[in-house]
């Protein structure tokens, strides 16, 4: 059996070499000729699987994407050709949620914001949105949830419309798939018509798909604010319309810029590989023999000792708010500080390229890779709910 696998899918050899011949390829440079005699094609979001790509795929039986998003896959075409398909829903949900919180701590420090006193709108409450919702709830953040497909879900007690979210929220974090059709298309969800609804001091995070925000309209709105002496939007963009060629004029107005890597933790990418491995074994009726638990390496930092000092003011002693003075900020940024990736993006976008940044992305671990030895049981429980391993 022949496997053709994107070079940025980690541990592909460990998972698939025992099943057949593995060949790696750069995601944007895959040619139809390379699919001749290939049984399994595994891609990431930068590879468009369409009629042109699989025109010569004479043996293709399975296409998998090691991502949550599926907008780069012509699923109807695959179905018509009798080619099985699977994505990896939820594989990087935790990674993206941790990216957002790391970014919010950066904004908290830069602008001296205590987000514990702010309202956060989560736009799109799928796997990623729910993960972020859970973490922010642990942090005591007031939330607004916007997802028309889940509007009647009893668990979404604080569901609001998009217009209400844009009007009321201090922070707006986008986590929708990219859709252009259907009853609720997300293409240009934030656009020239509704940008004026935003609060003056709003923070915007986009870690979904670039086209969810009309980038040119956003730039025009920011310039309008600047011209009329209004506060600048505090802006975090991980995804960009027109990738791999972002709107460069927008970059100077961003507080944090990254190259579509919010879900690029080692754990997130590896979970996607494992999910596709299980799907392949299921399809071809093969026994699974490799597990993620036995594949992931230990992190460079594995243990942190947290000696908590308790005083009479319990809330102050815990210090676990989403604010610039929080001890939690130090702990989270010890594992991952998004400013590293912002610096890499700004330095390398012109010098190298958007895809070069993604291809050469350094190893990044999730909070779960750290064991926190904590002398305070209540704090240990709090950290465990956020996703840390505690002792």
Image (cartoon, helix red, strand yellow):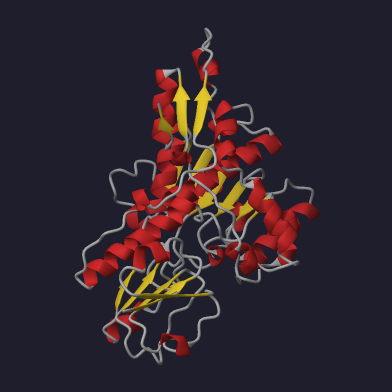
Quarter in which the N terminus is drawn: bottom left
In terms of depth relative to the viewer, which is nearer, 147 or 310?
A: 310
Given the current orientation, which residue lies at the most extreme left position?
285
In the image, is 60 to the left or to the right of 236?
left
Query: Is residue 77 positioned above or below 131 on the image?
Result: below
**Nearest to the observer: residue 19 or residue 65:** 19
State the residue in front, 209 or 265. 265
Q: Is residue 169 left or right of residue 133?
A: right
Residue 50: % across, % down:
43, 83
Residue appearing at x 41%, y 66% in the figure? 13
Whether residue 123 is visible here, answered yes or no, is no
Residue 349 appears in the picture as rendered: yes
Dividing the image into 4 quarters, which one contains the C terminus? top left
User: Which residue appears at 57% of the width and 26% of the height?
Assistant: 327
Coordinates of residue 100 in the picture (x, y in percent): 54, 46
User: At which x and y percent is residue 135?
Assistant: 44, 38
The answer to whether 1 appears left or right of 215 in the picture is left
């Amino acid at each position: 059996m022949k496997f053709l696998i994107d070079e940025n899918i980690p541990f592909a050899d460990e998972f698939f070499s025992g099943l057949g011949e593995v060949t790696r390829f750069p995601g944007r440079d895959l040619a139809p000729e390379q699919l001749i005699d290939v049984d399994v094609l595994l891609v990431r979001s930068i590879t468009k699987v369409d009629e042109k790509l699989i025109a010569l795929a004479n043996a293709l039986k399975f296409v998998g994407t090691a991502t949550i998003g599926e907008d780069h896959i012509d699923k109807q075409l695959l179905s018509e050709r009798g080619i099985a398909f699977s994505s990896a829903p939820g594989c990087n949900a935790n990674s993206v949620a941790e990216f957002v919180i790391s970014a919010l701590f950066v904004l908290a420090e830069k602008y001296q914001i205590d987000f514990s006193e702010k309202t956060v709108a989560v736009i799109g409450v799928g796997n990623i949105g729910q993960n972020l919702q859970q973490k922010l709830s642990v942090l005591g953040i007031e939330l607004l949830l916007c997802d028309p497909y889940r509007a009647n879900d009893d668990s979404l007690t604080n569901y609001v419309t998009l217009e209400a979210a844009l009007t009321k929220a201090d922070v707006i974090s986008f986590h929708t798939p990219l859709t252009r059709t259907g009853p609720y298309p997300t293409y240009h969800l934030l656009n020239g018509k509704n940008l004026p609804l935003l609060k003056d001091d709003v923070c915007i995070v986009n870690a979904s798909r670039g086209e969810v925000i009309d980038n040119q309209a956003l730039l025009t709105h920011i310039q309008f604010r600047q011209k009329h002496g209004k506060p600048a939007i505090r802006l975090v963009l991980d995804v960009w319309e027109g990738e791999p060629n972002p709107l460069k004029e927008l970059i100077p107005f961003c507080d944090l810029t990254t190259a579509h890597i919010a879900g690029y933790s080692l754990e997130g990418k590896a979970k996607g590989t494992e999910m596709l491995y299980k799907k392949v074994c299921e399809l071809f009726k093969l026994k699974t023999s490799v597990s993620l638990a036995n594949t992931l390496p230990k992190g460079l930092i594995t243990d942190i000792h947290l000696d908590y000092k308790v005083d009479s003011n319990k809330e102050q002693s815990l210090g676990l708010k989403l604010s610039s003075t929080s001890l939690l900020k130090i702990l989270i940024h010890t594992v991952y500080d998004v400013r590293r990736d912002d610096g890499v993006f700004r330095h390398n976008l012109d010098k190298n390229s958007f895809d070069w940044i993604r291809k050469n992305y350094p190893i990044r671990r999730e909070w779960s890779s750290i064991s926190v030895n904590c002398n305070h049981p209540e704090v240990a429980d709090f950290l465990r709910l956020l996703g840390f391993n505690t002792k």
